[in-house]
Amino acid sequence: MSEIVVALAGNPNVGKSTIFNALTGLHQHVGNWPGKTVERKEGRLLLNGKTVTVVDLPGAYSLAARSLEEQIARDFIARGRPDLVVNVVDAANLERNLYLTAQLLETGVPLLLALNMTDIAASRGIVINPAALSAGLGVPVTLLAASRGEGISALKATMAEMLARLKSSKQMREVAA
Amino acid sequence: MTTIAMPNIPFRYPAPIEREIEQLATLFAQTPALTDYPARWLAIQALEGDEALLAEIEAGGDSRVKAALAASLERLRAVYGDEIDIVMVDQRYRFVHDIAIRAVTRPATPPATLSDRIDRIVTHRWLGIPIFLVVMWLVFKLTTDVAAPFVDWLDRVLSGPVSRWVSGLLHLVGAGGGWFEALLIDGVLAGVGGVLAFVPVLLTLYFALALLEDSGYMARAAFVMDRVMRLFGLHGKSFLPMIVGFGCSVPAIYATRTLDSRRDRILTGLLVPFMSCSARLPVYVLITMIFFPQYAGHVIFALYLIGIATAVGVGALLRGLLFRQQPATPFVLELPPYRLPAPGNIWRQMWERTSAFVRKAGTIILTASIVVWLLLAIPVGGEGQFANTPVEQSAFAGLARATTPVFAPLGFGNWESSGALVTGLIAKEVVVGTLTQVYTGGEAAADDTAAMTLSEDLVLIVGDFGAAVGEALRALVGMVGFEIGAALEEPVTTGLAAAIQVGLATSSNGHGELAALAFLVFVLLYTPCVATLAASRHEFGLRWMLVSLVGQFVIAWLAALLVFQGGLALGIRLPL
């Protein structure tokens, strides 16, 4: 049985590394600074008794491979085909963040939207309707304020649920073939 | 198994484009060389004109695929002209915008956030750069004035009680008095200990850098410096790796990956080592405390500025010589919101970086110290024996003397300094280690005659620490502007300080301060360490690594020459 791979993707400085550290228990350098992660970092996470490899991809505004870091992210998603991509987005700058989401949708990888920095968005009076977001994108949405440690367990639960569902649908397809 | 199942995508392109996407995707899915990629995605990228992927299709597709792609593009050009990609990007934005309208409610008048208000001042057209300089100046005052008392304390503890304890232990087990004791005390303790004594300086520096980074100020610094970089034809994005370079050149070289073109990456990679890394700081602190005790902070601050200025100047030169052409790409940097630094984050960064430093002391610096000790122990000429030879007659002195002609015009052509610079190529902390070993060889071992009991030692250590805290607090208060007993700092008077002072005074014919300054400039500008060379070879290849190695040496040599000979010619007496 091949290993399960989950990739974290998103714009620079949206909290991917913070979420990565919270998921894997590793201590990757977190900086308030775009472009901190220039190569992908890997860690392990135990989800429902199964080991999942979590990959933290460099931040990218789009999947057009203009810089080396965007190239790393794109290659990993388009060719590596992770089992699940957790797209971390900044709730305070949602519209701009969603451009990458649109491109990720086009790759057809299973996607989970992690709406991070909800605390900062709230402090600026921004109200987000997760149901409308989820309906519009056609992917599950989960809310976080990762720097305060909020929403991590909900994220893990959604990840586990999606991975289980993907696995059973994959098996069904293989049986059909 | 190839399924051409189209992923469930909630948005579509205009019908003419959608038609071509479907045709191409079907073809791509049947082309073995292209099945690595999701077929629909690849079709979209191809129509959008992604060059890397088009090349792959060109290489991997058969004639049918190529013909189909050309025909698709032809048909779309008839409808959209040259704007196919714009139409597609626009469609994506429209999709995103529609969702945002449905899912996001913003306040009618967005409140001017605190971040915005701070930025109005900090990134101000005229105030931005002075503010950046003041911040840097405070950082270096902090690392010198506040950390220095603790360096002295740690140094006294290591060379006093700890050396005595090691020696005492060795005598207890019957291994005292021999070459092994000399190796441990003159080699390991003098070399590694001399470097470890600077842990307080690095802790302070890492604390300050973590604070600036976590608060969000570093990104502003890059933004502010973009204007300066632009004056010299450099890309503003280059400044981010350079700021990383204040910590360590190795991650800074890897940070050049954020730049868009290979040329920019190489150019920035060549400049990064001029940014003064934290490993050079112990050398600065040691030398400035000896020669310019009153102005240590100012001198160190000036060194950092010289580093930046050299990087900018060399950058402009290289751009003119090697990388002419190509218009500068615009600098887009997202300014993260200011936030209160998280103590956990700060602590983790300080801890990680400091422990990396201590690990380095335990490996590279330990090895270098032992090698230097061996070279110091081996007699060449004279009638000394192994581990019992005057330092001037050691193999180390012999080898170092061979390099002295290179450094003589710079004012530090004594073999002790030259030797330290050569071993400093391994890592900059080794400069301090070697100087300590060379100058205190034999002294430390003789020190243990003073019979101190363990409790006396402990009282001394604790009492000294209290005094260091007091001094540090005074320095901290002094920084804010209340000068309380600022003149209390006395010149370092230990054996090491006196020996370094005499050494440089002799090598420069009585212009020790000028020679010290030239020495510092040289340390600032030549290759930081072998790890940096390895990183630059990894990122840019052997050729650029050699360019970097040779180029830095030449620049460092010329700059030190300018300082020393220029200072002599102008008859400058230091301190002014």
Image: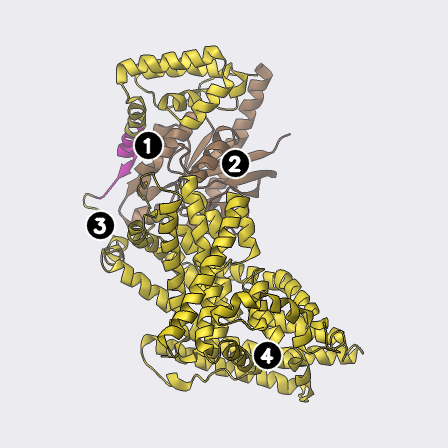
Chain colours: A brown, B yellow
Q: Position of residue A32 (x, y in %)?
A: 39, 52
Identify the secondary structure beneath mark 2.
strand
Cβ atoms at labels 3 and 1 below 8 Å apart: no
Task: Name the residue type under label 4.
Answer: Val
Left-right relation of B263 to B74? right
Q: Which residue is mark 4?
A: B157
State how far apart marks 3 and 2 are (Cα).
37 Å
Q: Which residue is mark 3?
A: B111
Q: Nearer the viewer, residue B403 or B172?
A: B403
Task: Name the residue type under label 3.
Answer: Pro
Task: Name the residue type under label 2.
Answer: Val
Q: Is residue B99 magenta?
A: yes
Cβ atoms at labels 1 and 4 below 8 Å apart: no
State how far apart marks 3 and 1 are (Cα).
25 Å
Left-right relation of B193 to B478? right
Q: Which residue is mark 2?
A: A6
Q: Which residues are magenta?
A: B95-107
Q: Nearer the viewer, residue B125 or A119?
A: B125
Report whether mark 3 lies on the same chain as mark 2. no
